[in-house]
Image (tube, grey):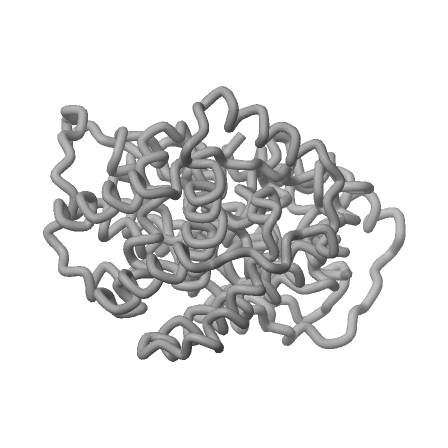
Amino acid sequence: MKLFFPDCLWSPNQISGSSFLYFHDEPIGFGLHPSVTSHLTGVDSLTFLRFLEEKAPPWKDSFMAFFNLWLKFRQSLHATHDLVEPLREKSFKTILFSYDRGTHAWERADELLASSSLQVPEIHSLIDPLHACDELYAHLFFEKVIEERFGHLSQEALARIGNQMASASRGHEDLIKDYDWTAVYEYCSEIFTRHSLPELLTRAYMFRMPAVKDAPAILLSNPHILKFLNSLPINLPERNASKAELDADVIAWEFFRQLVSPFADPLDAKKVALVNAMLNNRRHEVERLKNKCYALAGNLANEEHLDQLTSHVRDHIKGHVSNELQQLLELDHKAFQEYLVEVFSDDKTWVALSSFVLGVIAGVEVVTAGSAICALSKLGATALKEAAKHHKRLASSSYTAIYRMRRA
């Protein structure tokens, strides 16, 4: 399983619809959002706002800016989960990550930032601020509440209480409404006075970073964070640069993404329905296309430069794949030559928000799944050919899946 990491999936712009097709035989693992367990404190965290309103501290505006950003995150999170729900189990599973977001993590995050050769403002420009908002929310309203309510207990007693809370069916109306927020308020006063909101979010974003080194293969949810990872003083395994080559799976995925993304992106309800239909009814055609992409990857077997892979794949598709695609897609359009000119030669078709990179932590491949690339609708009306020839070509072509998606 490849993990979508480090951010949770909170926006459809974070991932390409082609990812759900390519990785359908090994579903993507989406980490649940950091604050997913906040209700297990037994406290209604939203009542903190009333406490804050009464106190009216100087840092109130900064806190409310954070809270409003978090509300934006939550709204997009729920909408995105509803959008991709039809693909659950077929193409993705959700995972509850277990990692420290408490006092020790806060201290380690400061050490991690300090070890980077980049300054905090530059690191802030690389993080996902919406995901960071939820990390900070979980730090304040889960970890700090747990420390305040149960910090005096042993690990064994705390584990028992946690199990009891997790197994109880607790609704919002059952949460404590009159919780004494004094300790959490004082902690907020300390950190919101000492640090700007960008600094707080950057620090909170570091909570999941240590887990990167243990991930065998990931779909990088935020390609910008690689600049930060590259800035850390990490000793990488020795590599023979003259013999370094990209994994065939990485190259095959790039072929698949470029061929399919114009039909699967930007991800919306219609595109999700199309991907779902392909997985339900045309899975063998998706597999045939994947196999073709592996064969195409062999043509770039000596590729060494990840930053050039996207453009090299594009050029190869334009030079070698388009003829075979024409034989299939001309069944529906007499002017397929115009399609090639307008789509495959248009650079906008290949502009994605991320490209393939090499893992900087453990020397393993890190696959990036970018957000939508510009989809073009320049094909016009379709024209049918003779049915027997039509079915014969569909049955044998490696690109039948693209044909299905183009017609949807």
Q: Is residue 315 left or right of residue 372?
A: left
379 or 88: which is nearer to us?
A: 88
Vertical placement of residue 226 versus 95, above or below: below
Q: Is residue 114 left or right of residue 217?
A: left
Where is residue 334 shown, x and y percent of the image? 72, 69
Q: Quadrant of the N terminus?
A: top right
Q: For residue 66, what is the image quadrant?
A: bottom left
359 or 225: which is nearer to us?
A: 225
114 or 287: which is nearer to us?
A: 114
Decide if residue 196 is in sight here.
yes
Q: Is residue 138 left or right of residue 228?
A: right
Where is residue 51 shown, x and y percent of the image? 50, 69
Q: For residue 391, what is the image quadrant?
A: top right
Q: Is residue 356 left or right of residue 20?
A: left
Q: For residue 24, what is the image quadrant?
A: top right
Decide if residue 295 is in sight here.
no
Q: Quadrant of the C terminus?
A: bottom right
Vertical placement of residue 387 versus 287, above or below: below
Where is residue 151 shown, x and y percent of the image? 42, 36
Residue at the spot 63% in from the left edge and 59% down from the top edge: 177
Residue at the spot 31% in from the left edge and 79% down from the top edge: 58
Q: Looking at this view, name the residue that lies furthest to the top.
A: 156
Vertical placement of residue 290 versus 230, above or below: above
Where is residue 374 shown, x and y percent of the image? 52, 69
Vertical placement of residue 238 versus 47, above or below: above
